[in-house]
Image (cartoon, grey):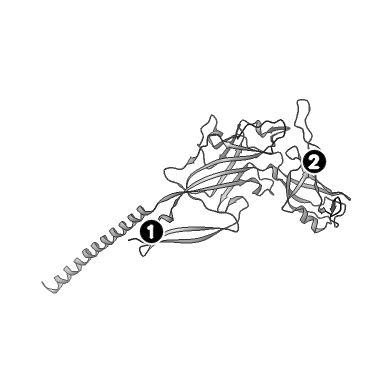
Amino acid sequence: MDNHEYTKLYYNSRPLESSSEEDESSEEEENEQLQLNKKINYGKNTFNFLIDSADRDWTDLATETFNFQVKFGNSSDSNEIIKTLSIENNQYKISEETKRFLGSKTLSFPINVRNIESISVHTLIMPKRLMYLGGANYMDILDFRYLLVCIEEISNVYYGTNSDINKAIAVMYPLSVIYKSGTEPKHIEFKDKGHLIKEFKPVPINCFNSLKFVIKDPNGKVLKFKNDVISIKQVDIHASNEFITITTNESINDEYKNGDLIKIKNFNTSDTIDSRFITFINREDGHKIYKETAFVDTTYNSTANLVNSFVIIAPGSYDSSSPPKFVRDSYLQETTLSSNITGKILNTNLQFSLFLKVDTKIVEFNNLNSQII
């Protein structure tokens, strides 16, 4: 065999040996991956979310109470720890990464929910107040046969005789029979009649970026109050009086009751007033309100009148005299504030709470061996 033939035979044989080695290496990697998959156990993680309508950006009067959006992973000053499983030097390795989320004006949760297997609505807590139908018509919340909770991105959990039921994820009924006579509760708990769960099969959904919720009556009309958010028109500080009168641009009925807690944001005026009063009006604790007359719903021969004012307690405290008496803060002087007034009012007693349950598929890290033998 001459040198040329030897060289040709030598180089032609090398790829065959290399291919064999690569095949063996590939088979070993596949076997390692197969063993890894056998050892990984999958479990279920349940997220319980509470949606409170008072947390929305209610300073925007265009925001509807019962038509809202919820975002996931969009809360300011919130972190989430992401765990990742990998193999390094034939050992299982769990790495952690802290992810920071940006802020959002909509209702939001500070976590991303991934690998979603199912979602369901458990409970809806509604205020026991009058819903607005339009004109002079109002409806007690218990006079509806049922309520529908719809999620725009999810449908066909229920099947009904109208399209709104087909879009509902829950059909809500009062938890127990409640009679109108006597002392009435301030809130009513509603439960999903069918206890149905929307499952995502055969594979989970990767994640929810946002969900749009709508709460409707049996006719498919979105529920609404006449005014659960109102704006300030005038503030009257009376001489030597324990109360301050607030006049609003909008008229209110028995949606607002004596003893309700309101919150005021962005109140200001071009009239001269001590800055401590501005701070007092905008305080986060809110104010208890008092109405002079109660609203009586429409009867067959008359319609009820609405009001546009109520009072709150002025800034001050009780002194140590016997008996103790309320004393206004000394900086407060009699005046009327009406020039270039800004400020929105939210009635916290007109807000609802919705409990949402989400089940996700996760890797159970605790069941992994630290080393492959």
Q: Residue at x 42, y 45 (%)?
A: 203
Q: Nearer the viewer, residue 368 or 72?
A: 368
Horizontal arrangement in the rendering, residue 318 relative to residue 106 (left or right): right
Residue 369 at x, y = what percent? 38, 58
Residue occupying the far top of the picture: 300
Amino acid of disc 2:
Lys
Of the residues under marks 2 and 1, which one precedes in the sequence? 2
Q: Is residue 11 visible?
A: yes
Residue occupying the far left of the picture: 1
- Per the image, the residue denoted by label 2 is 291
Q: Nearer the viewer, residue 327 or 347?
A: 327
Residue 320 at x, y = what percent? 84, 55
- Per the image, the residue denoted by label 1 is 369
Q: Secondary structure at mark 1?
A: loop
Horizontal arrangement in the rendering, residue 216 relative to residue 308 (left or right): left
Q: Nearer the viewer, residue 210 or 11?
A: 210
Label 1: how many Cα within 10 Å (few below 14, some 14–19, many 20+): few
Residue 296 at x, y = what percent? 77, 32
Q: Residue at x 43, y 42 (%)?
A: 201
Residue 42 at x, y = what percent? 42, 50
Q: Is residue 151 visible?
A: no
Horizontal arrangement in the rendering, residue 181 relative to residue 85 (left or right): right
